Image (cartoon, rainbow, N blue to C red):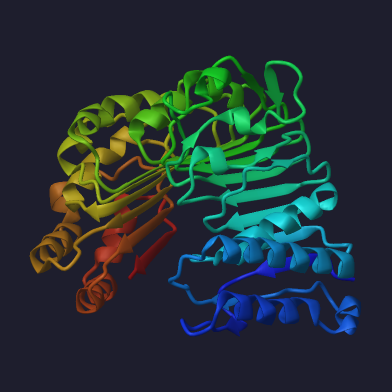
Amino acid sequence: MVKQLLFDEKCHHVSVNEADSLKTFMSILEALFCGLPEEIRLTKPFIMWFELEYIDETPDSLLMRQCHDASKAVADALINRYPNVSSISTTMLYPHEFFQKLIVELVVGYDKQLTKYVNDMPTAFPYTLTAPKLVELDLTFYCVSEYDLPTICPRSPRKIRIDLDQIPFSWDMFRVGNVSETIVFDNLVDLSITDVYEDSDAGNMAIANNLDLEFPKLERLHTNNSSLTRKVAQAMMSHGLKWLHCEGSIISASQLCKQPLGTLDTLILVWVGEVYSEEFDDFVPLTNEIFNKTSGIEFVRCEISKINISEIMDRVDWPYLTHLMLGFNIPFNVLLDMLPKVPNLVHLEIDICGCDKNVLDETTELLTNIKEHYPIPSSSKIETLCLNISHSIMRWKFCNKMSFGGVFENLKWYLPQLKTIDILE
């Protein structure tokens, strides 16, 4: 019984060159779809994979109508032949308009029975989905406007992922089926949002500002490069959230973490890439505020990459941080001096030299003679230490020092709780 339709760019190759007319192309596709052997109905969930070369042509009104008619005909044929489909997944970078219209027709046609819908292509979808059985919704939209996003009933999904590539956004897209001014995600457990900005200039933002959101069962929240209003942040954090992963702006992370964190058992904060000067000035005060609120959270991880904060590490105060990853070259003495500020740290991962031989020599000298610089062992709780050394020759030299230069023994002496040292590429 066929239950899944998956459209991808990687496998079956339908090649269309400039000499082929759109009409011929549609005929090929109609034959490809509608001529599928009947015995496929008896095999495992059916997967259709396609790779479509980009067609650089602008169809006139006649071809546009043909495109719509053909996509509707193919969709109807598929729905009639495979009536039990409950999952549709699409991943196409440059879909022809035929495919865009075909996907819309299929999703609308299977609306009442869909349990999973994954969209990763620039599809205009200005339609309403009630999808009463939908469990998983994964939407990646780009190259479209806010007015081309679908409107979706929020009641049934347990997992929602939204990536809007900074398209102006409003939670009003989930207003389907709500007669009050409150949008309730009745069964939502897992929510992930990427590049979602609640834009005050968006056409429907005035309506959305008057809406209340409720997430009564939300347990997992992942935000990436997104900006949420205080009202939305409060709604997301107010019903027993267990897992919070926030990456992007320190300001956005701080806004989320101003909410009560007492129900969390996992907090992951990630900062990668450029930090604006005003954010850099606020980095230590804001992170200190966050990590002083995390008492009682079992797993608290901070990842910082491509932001060299070595010069301000002496000001950090992260008493309840348990896992730290520093993806920039940091002098080892700065790191050791910081350890008293992170007394509950159990896992530390750092870049220690990049391709700088001098830094490597300084690090190995410090660790070889650590008792001269630090005569008293640390009270640190670190159990796992991961050292990233990208240069292969330098990594070999450091490993040689670890084995024969006493570095491993010295680290074990200074970090009494240390159980594992990993040297990574």
Q: Can you say whether 387 is above or below 268 in the image?
A: below
Q: Is residue 25 above or below residue 166?
A: below
Count of marks placed on residues: 0
Residue 140 is situated, as x and y percent measured from the top left of the image, at 54, 51
Question: Viewed as shown, does residue 364 lie left or right of 320?
Answer: left
Q: Which sits in the foreground, 9 or 347? A: 9
Name the residue rendered at 17%, 64% in the picture.
Answer: 364
Residue placed most toward the observer, 221 or 111: 111
- Give how far across and how far down residue 227 sits, in percent: 43, 32
Q: Which quadrant holds the N terminus? A: bottom right
The residue closer to the viewer here, 278 or 106, is 106
Name the residue rendered at 30%, 35% in the picture: 340
Residue at horizontal 57 percent and vertical 75 percent from the top: 22
Say which quarter of the image contains residue 9.
bottom right
Q: Tell me if I can see residue 91 in this picture.
A: no
Given the current orientation, which residue lies at the most extreme left position?
358
Residue at the far front in the pictured view? 62
Q: Position of residue 409 (x, y in %)?
A: 30, 63
In the rendering, at what x and y percent does residue 40 appear?
A: 85, 80
Let me know if residue 154 appears in the view: yes
Which quarter of the rendering shows the C terminus?
bottom left
Q: Is residue 190 left or right of residue 255?
A: right
Task: Please name whichever residue, 13 or 264, is drawn nearer the observer in this view of the structure.
Answer: 13
Q: Quadrant of residue 100?
A: bottom right
